[in-house]
Amino acid sequence: MDKIYIGAAYYPELWDMREVDKDIDRCKSLGVNVLRIGEFAWDRMEPSEGTFDLDWLVSVVDKLYADGIYTVMCTPTCTPPRRLLDKYTEMRAVGSDGKRADVSSRCHVCKTSPVAREKNRMIVTELARSLSKHDGVIGWQIDNELFPYDHGCYCPLCEAAFREYLKEMFGSIDKLNDAWGMARWSLSYDSFDAVLPPYPKQWRHPSLRKAWWDFQCCQIKTFADEQADILHKYGCKNVGTDMMCNNNLSYYDVNEKLDVVMFNHYDRAEDLPKTAFSYDFLRCVKDKPFWVTETQVGWNGSEFAECGSRPIGNCYMNTVLPVAKGAEMNMYWQFRAHRSGHELAHGALFSAAGRAYRVSDEVAKAIADINKCGDFIKNTCIESKIALSYSVTAANCFGSAPMLKDFDYRKTLIEKYYSAFRHYNVDVIDTRHGLDGYDTVISPFLAAVDENDLKTRMIEFVRNGGTWIVGPLTDIMDGNVNKYTRSPYGFLEEFAGVYTKYQKPLDNKEFKARYTDGKECAISACYDAYEVKDGTTSIATYTDCEFAPLSVITERKTGKGKVILVGSVIEERDLLLLAGKKPIAEASDNIVLTERTAKGGKRNGIIACEVENRSGYIELDGEYIELITDRTLSGRVDIAPYEALMLVGK
């Protein structure tokens, strides 16, 4: 990490050059050192079909660079000009209602259309030729918020491509029917031509729904890869695509050929503690610093404002927190509010009239404080001994068959598991990620384990000394959203040394459990009851309910490590006891702690962030220098609402 970049999205195509010059002065007044431009400017870049004009864009990049402001250049492929979309209607996606998209907003392009792909290649090639060697361009963003909106495109091209995708996956229709269990209800297909997409308002087979989603995500990946190949061919650096805050479109897949992970979020002010979950996930996708390419600066909005204004200090912390968690860039949407169009009511650093908002001062303060700590941030990294599983396959299996009523996979991981580790370094990882360096891996609701060789790797992880805290509802499905028939689990019964006597996927207040020392073990959401086999011990058992005295938590030592099987959702304090790790420091629950490990002989440090707009504290085990204020601190230190402490040991 050579530099920390703080900036915003900017749309110079909407302003004459005199206003651009004024906006550059406004950037300098705040300390903004990067702008993201070009993502919706295709019409200006190609004023008539096949005729390109990028001189104005190069001029803007020149102006920015001359004043010390870098550019993230975007490909404009989510907003082709109206004339192209009207001339080549196949470029427009078809919604789940069967209607071809109107040319009325953005992100309405079919990812399968050969014409769309060809037009994309042309505009991306022209951009790369013009700006790949410009010293002011430090990164490239492909498209904008790629995602299978409305469950994807339902046009004839996508239907045909879906069937080819299934043919390649299964080889024969008989194998598909068997894999999906289509004999039930006499649903077997006679040929691949009989397979239709799952329309959302109809009760469609879970295996079909997941396969359709996987296909749409595959099309998005090739859509991004194609542009990345062109950009890389011309020597463009730091190529990425800005993705939203869920893992239903696989971050690992989409970023496979890209250089930097980019992320957009519009979390409410009160959800800032949960935003840290995304950062601990993003950092691991490529095991390198990530870029936050969009977040709200004041409030969200379209034709009207929504999502609430940010309390004083929240925008400051929304700038500092990603940097603390491993980002090297944080950009707001947007720099200057639009004077027309769909998002008139959205917040910005400056109004359409060019006037600063209160939050603009917070961004300026955050930039100044981050700059004071630049050497510390650049020369340290985040090392975690604890990993939390967060799987795209699990997200999409539970999306197709939730198993529990109103179950939200991501929300459950954050609120019931991740939040326990606010005072720890923790990596949030998908099944493809390596396991080296971790002491403890926690895998709740990891529906499908037998992918990316994870089953074999987890067995080796435990045998080599790791602790695997696994369950509930882990290893219960294959990738086709099918249950196992030999056992309720694919392999966990055998590995954990248990026999699953009962399962109950219904939350209730009747089921109770206690640890072997007599202390209460609070449980919720779902309930698996185990008989333990030789070599396995019971940690907690059901009491005063129909499952008593069967086990709800078991432990089995294997090799140098152990597997702890958990049959229900347990409380934070119990999860921490099972993990058996000491926190970075003692602190109040509203403080997020990140320990930074020094590189090159520099000193280690701690970043403490207050994220709930109330006073808190941290207990320091020695003397530290606080880099923002240059204070020497020790013992119990009070932390004000939305305050950040950058602490380096003396």
Image (tube, rainbow, N blue to C red):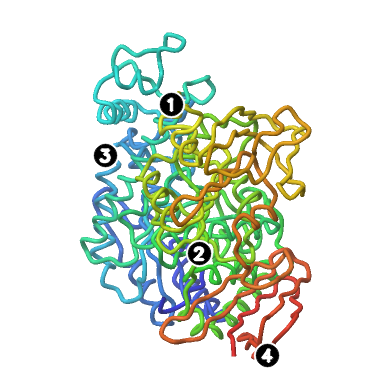
Depicted 570 relative to depicted 386: above or below: above
* Label 3 or label 2, whichever comes before in sequence order: 3
**Callouts 4 and 1 close, C-beta under 8 Å:** no
Q: Which mark is residue 207?
A: 1
Query: Residue at coordinates 34% horizontally, 37% vertically from top-left?
Result: 91
Q: Residue at x 22, y 64 (%)?
A: 234
Q: Earlier in the sequence, mark 4 or mark 1?
A: 1
Crowd tier of the residue under label 1, counting other residues whose Cα lies within 10 Å: few below 14, some 14–19, many 20 or above: many
Figure quadrant of residue 646: bottom right
Q: Earlier in the sequence, mark 2 or mark 4?
A: 2
Q: Nearer the viewer, mark 2 or mark 4?
A: 2
In the picture of the structure, the residue carrying the numbered disc 3 is: 115
The percent coordinates of residue 205 (x first, y second) are: 47, 21
**101 left or right, relative to 266:** left
Q: Amino acid at mark 3?
A: Val
Q: Check the picture and name the quadrant holding the C terminus.
A: bottom right
The nearer-to-camera label among 1 and 2 is: 2
Q: Which residue has dot 4 on it?
A: 631
Residue furthest to the top: 186
